[in-house]
Each structure stands twice: as structure tokens, then as C-alpha cells.
Amino acid sequence: MNQKCVMIIDEDLPLGEIANASAILGITLGGKLPEAVGESVRDGAGNMHAGVIKIPVPILKADREAIGKLRLRLYERQFGDLTAVDFTDLAQSCKTYDEFIDKMSYASELNYIGLAICGDSRKINKLTGNLPLMK
């Protein structure tokens, strides 16, 4: 199976928040897919460097409404084998993880500002093929 990963970030966020959302999605994705991270490597001077993800991760842009619709599609059975992690404005506003857990327990509507998806490239292309790169 041909594997692919993408991130979709809210195009209206300020640069610092785009960077923050991307970092959080990447860390979360790495925790869900540790096998996607390569082994540590040694440089020519003999210094060790931690492995990085083995496949490219393009960062795409969309508005919050499109990201929310995409997140809902990922709950459909046909996309159940894809790995998806999301990031909301609620999560971004919390100062502690306990605060996040508490607020999520009574949140009925979420505003997604970022989404990362890994898995079969055909399925990911079907979901995100019309989205432009973040530049």
C-alpha cells in the first residue's frame, strides 16, 4: 500500500499559531505512528541525530469550515483505516491538559484549526486532493 501523510491547517491563523498547530499535530501523529519515524542517524562527524518521519508531510491550507467537514468525513467507515489527529481552537486555548480534558467533556461543537491524516494515499488524495499547499 502506498502511504501518505498530510496536514491541513486553518489558512486564517497567524503564522505563530500555524507553527504551533503544525508542531502539536506532528508530535501527536508521531505518538500514534512511531513506526513512521526512522532510526537515528550518524553524521559525518560522528554525531547522532534523531530519526525523522520517513515520508513527506505536505502542509495544506483550508478554512475552518472545510477542515471541520473533512474531520467529519474521517468518521465514515470507508476512511476508518486512516490515522487522523485533530487540533481545535478549544485545545489551543487551554493552559493545561487537565483543563483541556475538562472543557472537552462538555464541548458539543468543535472548531478545527488543524488536522493530520496518514494512510492509504488514494484515500487521502480523495479527501484532500483539491486543497492547496500552505505557502
Image (spheres, grey):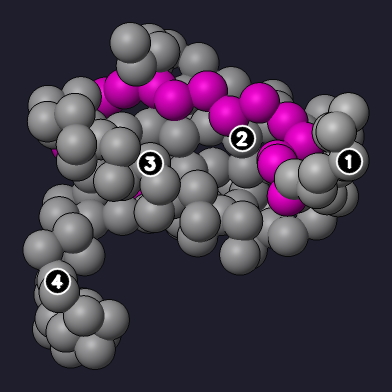
Q: Position of residue 32 (x, y in %)?
A: 63, 63
The secondary structure type at the circle numbered 3 is: helix
Horizontal side, residue 31 vs residue 15: left or right: right
* Element type at mark 1: loop
Q: Is residue 105 magenta?
A: no
Left or right: residue 58 versus residue 68 is right
In the depicted structure, whether residue 122 falls above or below residue 47: above
Asked which quadrant contains residue 11, the reply is top left
Secondary structure beneath dot 2 equals strand
What is the quadrant of the N terminus in the image? top right
The structure residue drawn at horizontal position 23% and vertical position 48%, both measured from the top left corner, is 112
Q: Residue at x 88, y 28 (%)?
A: 44
Q: Earlier in the sequence, mark 1 or mark 2?
A: 2
Mark 4 sits on what residue?
94
Q: Looking at the picture, how far across and down is residue 129, in whole percent?
A: 50, 16
Q: What residue do we see at 52% from left, 23% from top? A: 58
Pointers 1 and 4 in contact (CB under 8 A)?
A: no
Number of residues whose C-alpha sits closer than 10 Å to that of mark 2, classed few (under 14), some (14–19) or many (20 or more): many
Q: Earlier in the sequence, mark 4 or mark 3?
A: 3
Q: Are marks 1 and 2 in contact (CB under 8 Å)?
A: no
Mark 1 nearby-residue class (10 Å; few <14, some 14–19, many ≥20): few
Q: Which residue is mark 3?
A: 22
- Earlier sequence position, callout 3 versus callout 1: 3
Dot 4 falls on a residue whose secondary structure is loop
**Residue bounds of the magenta highlight:** 50-71
Give the residue pinned by disc 1: 46
Residue type at mark 1: give it: Gly
